[in-house]
Image (cartoon, rainbow, N blue to C red):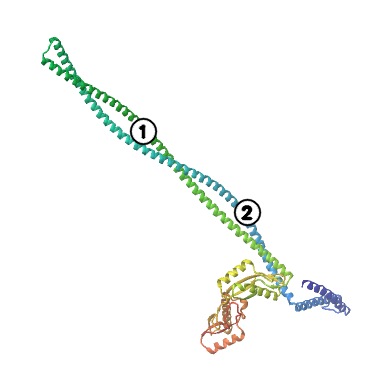
Amino acid sequence: MLLAFLAFVVVLAGVVAYAADNIGRRVGRKHLRLFGLRPKTTALLVAVAAGMGISLLSLLAFFVLNRQAIRNIEQADQLRVELRGLKRDVIKVQAGLKTAQKERDEANSKARLAGASASLAQAQYDTANSELQDARATTKRLETQAQALRERVQALTTLRSSLEAQAKRNQAALTASHEQLARAQAQVHELDGRLGTVQQQIAVLDQRNLEAGQATAAAEARAQQAQQQAAQLQQQVGTLQASSRQLSAQRDQLTTQRDQLKAQRDQLAAQRNQLQAERTRLAAERDRIRKDVAGLQQVVAGLKAQSQALQADNATLRRNLSSSQADVTRLEDEYTRATSELSATRNAELIFPKNAIVYGAVVPTVRNLDTFLQQADAAAQSKGIRSSPAVRLSVPARQALETTLRTLNASTYVLCRSQGNAAATSAVDLSCAAQPNTVLYPHGSVIRQVRVSLQISNEALRSQLQDLMSAAILDLTRRGVPLEYVLNNSLDTSDLLSVLNRLAARGGSSAVIGVMPKADVRPGSRVDLYADLVQ
């Protein structure tokens, strides 16, 4: 198209030059004068005017024969405005991209610092945890030793109690033995005294016997009796001496046993004092370890909280960075698509402007989605798209559409629009929306109504009816009916005259007028509206 236009301009320039030159020569030969000017000047003015007229007529003829060129020029002006807006958007996007990159770099640096801090905190946490485990093991070992010592102290206390009881019993026995020994010694002394007396008596009797020479039979009998008594006394003395020796040996043995028990008691007391000192030391060490463990637990809790805060900050930074990268990618895609669309519209014919309806139809189930997309492709090709495939639906958009179809699980009307300007040589990127194919407004139901005064002029009444029609169309679009499917954006002259005639025939000061559809209104149906009296 551009080459044809340039060729036409070149040919037109030649024709204008030739025709203007001939006209100027002819006027010069006739020596015509306009406005009192010289013939040469008059011929020049006529030649210039003729060239301008021929160019104007040629351009008008060209535009009449090729109206698409006018539309292309108008669209080029619109696209030029859009291009300037896109350039401004690109500058803003680039500035935002630089800011996002700067924020990303700052976030990366913060993330690295946070990672280093987290690593240091983790190392400190591991060290504190190992120290805590060692302290717990030491505490457990010391508690085991303390329990063993307590058991040993208890056993020794029991042994000491038993030994003290035995010592008391031995002491009582020793006291009894001492008392018995004292009694035996008293008896021995008494017997010794009696023995001495007897021996003195024997000595006196012997001396009397020696002095007398001869004794009488009575004296001899008494002497024999005394001798027998002395022998008995000697036997008793021997018995008492043996008992005394036995009691002395038993006393010595008891004294030795008492000394041993005293030494054992002193040893047990020293060991008890040592165990009590060890127990006191272990209790102090246990309290100190408990304090250290509590301090380590507080440090570990602080490190855990710091680590969790750092992890939360890292997650926030990652989300912000991902969001910024997604925004940058989306803006770059939009810029690339806008640039490609602008380039395509410059070099090829624009088939679908942005947000134009490409295809719409009823899809019974999700299994019929492929058939629907094939029909949309055929519809785009029939309107002039020469790309293969003619339409494209992105994977996320298709997944969202399939989810909607499964959710509705009924006959659904799907309407697809163009995401951007689509030329004949490029595929159309689709943006599809689905909604249940139910009746929104039955035939003859009131979409919007208003009470009008019959005392106003026809122009004011016409304005109110037009506002009512606009409000009804707005309700339809809010319910999901595309604006392109509304056949009449305003009341026909015949409908308006019919309403005015009925109002005039009805009389009164006011009336209620409603806008109603001529058929059932569904999301995919064409809507034809009319106005009528409601009451």
Depth check: 488 or 415 in front?
415
Q: CA distance from mark 1 to mark 2?
A: 77 Å
Q: Which mark is residue 105?
A: 2
Residue furthest right as drawn = 29
Image height check: is 316 above or below 343? above
Where, quadrant-wise, is the N terminus in this rendering?
Answer: bottom right
Residue furthest bottom as drawn = 505
The mark that comes first in sequence, 1 or 2, is: 2
Quarter of the image for residue 523 reads bottom right
Mark 1 Cα shell of 10 Å, populated few (<14), some (14-19), many (≥20)? some
- Secondary element type, mark 1: helix
Q: Which mark is residue 268?
A: 1
Please report the residue visible at 72 percent of the width from the left and 69 percent of the height from the top: 344
Please report the residue visible at 60 percent of the width from the left and 57 percent of the height from the top: 321
Depth check: 135 or 211 in front?
211
Residue furthest front as drawn = 217
Q: Position of residue 473 (x, y in %)?
A: 58, 78
Depth check: 222 or 371 in front?
222
Image height check: is 428 above or below 301? below
Depth check: 483 or 277 in front?
277
Q: Position of residue 152 (x, y in %)?
A: 39, 38
Q: What amino acid is found at the position of numbered circle 1 in the picture?
A: Leu
In the rendered picture of this protein, how many numbered marks are placed on residues? 2
Image height check: is 141 above or below 259? below
Q: What amino acid is found at the position of numbered circle 2 in the picture?
A: Asp
- Secondary element type, mark 2: helix
Q: Position of residue 255 (x, y in %)?
A: 30, 27
Q: Position of residue 298 (x, y in %)?
A: 47, 47
